[in-house]
Every structure is written in C-alpha cells, then in structure tokens.
Image (cartoon, grey):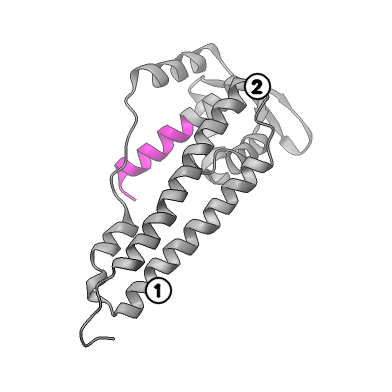
Amino acid sequence: MSIMEGTLIRMSLRHGILGLLSNRPASGYDLLSTFQETLANVWPATQSQLYGELNRLANDGLIRVTSTGARGRKEYELTDAGGDELHRWLVDVEPKRVNRNDMLLRVFFLGLLTRKEAVAYIENERAVTERYRAELKAIEDGNDWSQGDFAANGRIALEWGLRYTEMQREWADWALDRLAPKRSKD
C-alpha cells in the first residue's frame, strides 16, 4: 500500500468514526459492529484500524472518552472540534474517487490464458459478487431502516452496493458470452 492509499484509508476511517459518533456516543466495540453490520459496503474497518484511529482522534481533541467500564471499555463522544471537522469534510473536501481496479486489470490480460482459465476467472468474479450481494441483502434484512436520518441515509448507501453488485453480475454474464475462443491453447 502506498503512503497516499494509507492516508486515504486513515482519513476516510477518521471521518467515518466522527460521523458515527455524531449520531450517538459509542464504544470501540459498538463502532466496529456498526462498521461490520451497516458500513461494510461503504468502508470496511478492522479492529486494529478502528482502535488506532480512536486513539488518534482522542489525541487530536476530536472525540473524548465519556466513561470507562469493565475491562477498560471506553465510550466515546464527538467534541465540538470533531463536529466542526466532520462538517468541514462533508462540505469542503472533494471525495476521493479511486480509479484503480485490480480485477479489471486482470480482465484486460485474460487473452494470455486459455479460454477455460479465462471463463473460470469471470465465473469466480461472478460468484464473489453473488456472495457479497448476499451479505448486503443480509444487512438490508437485518436492520430497521426507519429509525431517523442516520438509518435512512445508511439504507441509501446500502442501495448503491446492491445496485453495483447487480451491475457486476450482469457484466460477468455479458463477459462470459463474449470471451473470444482461443486457437490452440484450449
């Protein structure tokens, strides 16, 4: 991972945490659960990434610990400075739109494989997409999306993932129909 990509991950995670804490105070465990259950298609986060960023946010004065419970469980809340930073990011910072796609780069070179290998690659991508779509559907079915703006906007973001995976599945079907037969490698 490049320094630029690492910074992008950290900055987006930073603002994801600030956004979640703008809804309500939460522990690291609660935040990680929310990332896994509702933000997975938008911005996945690992436990080590999340807890490291919580420490940085607290050190920067953007969040504060409001209580400490059993086994050192800390609950965090957004500070005024954190709310200001979240607002600045939402209004003034142009989103990073990543144009790199390792899967599609490989597709570009499928001509170097046998037809059977190329077909297997696209079929695997279709299967990966189907599994991911099933995960998103489980998130959709497992949440109450009527609980205010935060949930409603989360549902809007989830819909992007559902539609994107549908497009990926359609693309895989289309690609499988169009793979050029290889001459002697099959």
- The answer to whether residue 88 is above or below residue 160 is above
For label 1, the crowd category at 10 Å Cα-Cα, with few meaning under 14, some 14 to 19 and many 20 or more, is few
- Residue 83 % position (x, y): 51, 15
Q: Which mark is nearer the camera, 2 or 1?
A: 1
For label 2, the crowd category at 10 Å Cα-Cα, with few meaning under 14, some 14 to 19 and many 20 or more, is few
Q: Which mark is residue 24?
A: 2
Q: Quadrant of residue 39?
A: top right
Q: Is residue 44 left or right of residue 4?
A: right
Work out which residue is located at the far right of the displayed protein and give it: 70
- Residue 9 % position (x, y): 41, 40
Q: Is residue 120 left or right of residue 150?
A: left
Q: Secondary structure at mark 2?
A: loop
- Which residue is disc 1 drawn over? 120
Q: Nearer the viewer, residue 51 or 16?
A: 16
Type of amino acid under label 2: Arg
Residue 43 colored in magenta in the image: no
Q: Nearer the viewer, residue 16 or 71?
A: 16
Specify the quadrant that holds the C terminus: bottom left
Residue drawn at x 45%, y 16% is 87
Q: Is residue 174 left or right of residue 164?
A: left
Query: Taking the image as drawn, is residue 58 in sight?
Result: no
Query: Taking the image as drawn, is residue 93 in sight?
Result: yes
- Residues at marks 2 and 1, CA–CA distance in whole angstroms: 46 Å
- The answer to whether residue 4 is above or below residue 87 is below
Type of amino acid under label 1: Ala
Q: Secondary structure at mark 1?
A: helix
Q: Is residue 133 left or right of residue 9?
A: right
- The answer to whether residue 84 is above or below residue 34 is above
Residue drawn at x 29%, y 63% is 107
Q: Which stretch appears magenta?
A: 1-14
Residue 12 colored in magenta in the image: yes
Residue drawn at x 72%, y 34% is 73
